[in-house]
């Protein structure tokens, strides 16, 4: 099962890209996402290690480490799911005495690798700036008034 870490990370980055640094605290981000600030801090740490954001401890908040136009969705995916971590994994304990057990893992591995390459290729074609630009500004202004 693929967790929602990628979607939550994109939510974090969209908020950081849209707002001033002082509004990008883990508490404010967590409020928008509907999660605990600890989850935001953990994911923000991964995003910071990948060079996508900078985080100031305390009331400082977060800011993008480079322009949103220079951050692809693939960059975000790889920040959360390192290269060594496969999207789709093949079970490894098949019975070698079974003809299906002998052949199926290799066939699945080939298909899964192709699917992952297609996913990463598609993610590479969209930037954070495009994601941010596609948001409805009116809805965000209404949500900000709820603070």
Image (spheres, rainbow, N blue to C red):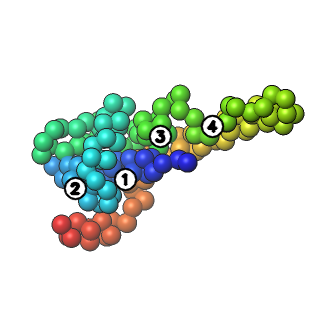
Asked if residue 76 can be seen in this view, the reply is: yes
In the displayed structure image, the side of residue 125 where residue 13 appears, left or right: left
C-beta proximity under 8 Å, tags 1 and 4: no
Q: CA distance from mark 1 to mark 4?
A: 26 Å
Which disc, if any, is residue 89? 4
Q: Residue at 16% of width from left, 38% of height from top? A: 57
Residue 13 percent location from the top left of the image: 34, 47
Q: CA distance from mark 4 to mark 3?
A: 17 Å
| Figure check: 80 above or below 137 | above
Res 104 quadrant in image? top right
Badge 4 or badge 3: first in the primary sequence: 3
Res 72 quadrant in image? top left
Give SS at disc 3: helix
Q: CA distance from mark 2 to mark 4?
A: 36 Å
Give SS at disc 4: loop
Residue 98 percent location from the top left of the image: 85, 33
Which disc, if any, is residue 72? none
Which of labels 2 and 4 is toward the front?
4
Question: Quarter of the image containing the C terminus?
Answer: bottom left
Badge 2 or badge 4: first in the primary sequence: 2
Say which residue label 3 marks.
Answer: 77
In the displayed structure image, the side of residue 46 where residue 116 appears, left or right: right
Q: CA distance from mark 3 to mark 2?
A: 23 Å
In the displayed structure image, the side of residue 65 where residue 86 appears, left or right: right
Q: Nearer the viewer, residue 10 or 85?
A: 85
- Within 10 Å of the Cα at label 3, are there few (<14), some (14-19), or many (20+) other Cα atoms? many
Say which residue label 2 marks.
Answer: 28
Q: Residue at 26% of width from left, 71% of height from top? A: 142
Badge 1 or badge 4: first in the primary sequence: 1
Q: Residue at 62% of width from left, 40% of height from top? A: 88
Residue 66 percent location from the top left of the image: 32, 36
């Amino acid at each position: 099962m693929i967790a929602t870490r990628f979607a939550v990370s994109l939510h974090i980055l969209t908020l950081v890209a849209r707002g001033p640094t002082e509004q990008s605290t883990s508490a404010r981000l967590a409020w928008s996402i509907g999660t605990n600030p600890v989850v935001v801090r953990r994911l923000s740490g991964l995003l910071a290690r990948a060079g996508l954001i900078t985080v100031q401890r305390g009331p400082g908040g977060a800011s993008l480490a480079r322009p949103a136009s220079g951050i692809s969705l693939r960059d975000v995916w790889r920040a959360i799911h390192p290269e060594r971590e496969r999207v789709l994994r093949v079970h490894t304990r098949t019975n070698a005495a079974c003809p299906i057990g002998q052949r199926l893992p290799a066939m699945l591995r080939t298909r899964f690798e192709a699917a992952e390459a297609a996913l990463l290729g598609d993610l590479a074609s969209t930037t954070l700036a495009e994601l941010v630009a596609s948001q409805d500004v009116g809805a965000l202004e209404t949500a900000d008034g709820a603070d």
